[in-house]
Image (spheres, rainbow, N blue to C red):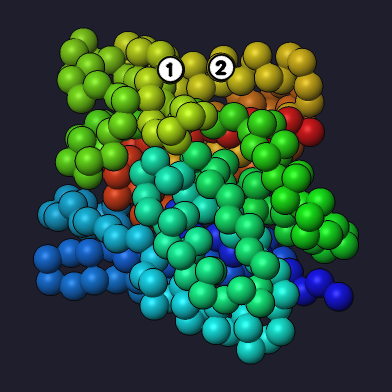
Amino acid sequence: MEKIALITDSACDIDEETLRKYNIHVLPFKIIYKEHEYTDGIEITPQEVYANMKTEIPKSSQPSMEDIENLYKKLEAENYTHVISINISSGISGTVNAVEFISRQYPAINTFVYDTKSTSVCQGIIVKKCGELLKEGMSFEKLKKAIPEMKKKVHMYFVFGTLEYAIKGGRIGKISGTIGNILDIKPIVSFDEEFGQCYTCEKIRGRVKSLNRLIELGEKFVSKKTCDAYVIHGNVEEDARKICDKLRENPSIKNVYLIGQISAIVGVYCGPGTVGVCYSEI
């Protein structure tokens, strides 16, 4: 009989209730300051990361090989036969490769590692849906086939408060580092499907117009199918709540979820002022 473990990493934006409900194992990133290193989500919160940015912008490192191996040892001891691992884009992190490497040391556990080519709440939605399907009794092989189809139905857009942090963190991808400083241009950012790197969808002048555009971009999805919408933010809850209120006015959006703060590891690169909306087709 299959015993399947569900793994993700701390770049995944997902609520604590869901993590507990589906027994999801989270591999933590490291948040690194000059004087100290913290375990993401355990020793430091997103709020603390944003507050500390006023004095120091930290670096980060992917989940350690030791942490991944310790998790596999635990799963082996608990007689797990299979693992589904849903991870941050390989275009911005080596986490996928690290999990694949360690998993090969445990051949008795059949592992499927999925590169989301994304992160944050997009990653979280896929993890949550996997948890639901596992609880319903879906087999390992069927879930492997279902995950790429889930990804096709999830569409995520961000507006950064500033590009300063993405530029300094080296995670700018295909976003121009200069456009944000010209005429108050705010890029609408998403992830490309091929490489899983950030790119600019559109360039909008002004904060208010850029936030409204996050809603308008969802129209091409909600006009065809009923969707759920998920909203996240980097220390700008008021902006996020306003977007939620506007999204709830659309009858084609069944549920609107305010997930809250963007995870600390993602926040290191997107910085305060970021707002994201993710549309998930039902």
Residue 178 lies, in percent from the top left, at 18, 20
The N terminus lies in which quarter of the figure?
bottom right
- In this rendering, would 77 be left or right of 139? left
Q: Which residue is mark 2?
A: 217
Q: Which residue is at the front of the view, 209 or 268?
A: 268
Q: Please tell me in which quadrant of the rendered image residue 91 appears.
A: top left
| 87 lies above or below 118 | below
| 191 lies above or below 115 | above
Q: Which residue is mark 1?
A: 201
Q: Count how many numbered circles sit on residues in the image.
A: 2
First in sequence: mark 2 or mark 1? 1
Q: Secondary structure at mark 1?
A: strand
Residue 129 lies, in percent from the top left, at 73, 50
Q: Please tell me in which quadrant of the rendered image residue 108 appears.
A: bottom right
Q: Residue at x 63, y 58 (%)?
A: 112
Q: Are marks 2 and 1 in contact (CB under 8 Å)?
A: yes
The C terminus lies in which quarter of the figure?
top right
Q: Which residue is at the front of the view, 185 or 92?
A: 92
Q: Residue at x 48, y 29 (%)?
A: 194
Q: Which residue is at the front of the view, 210 or 167?
A: 167
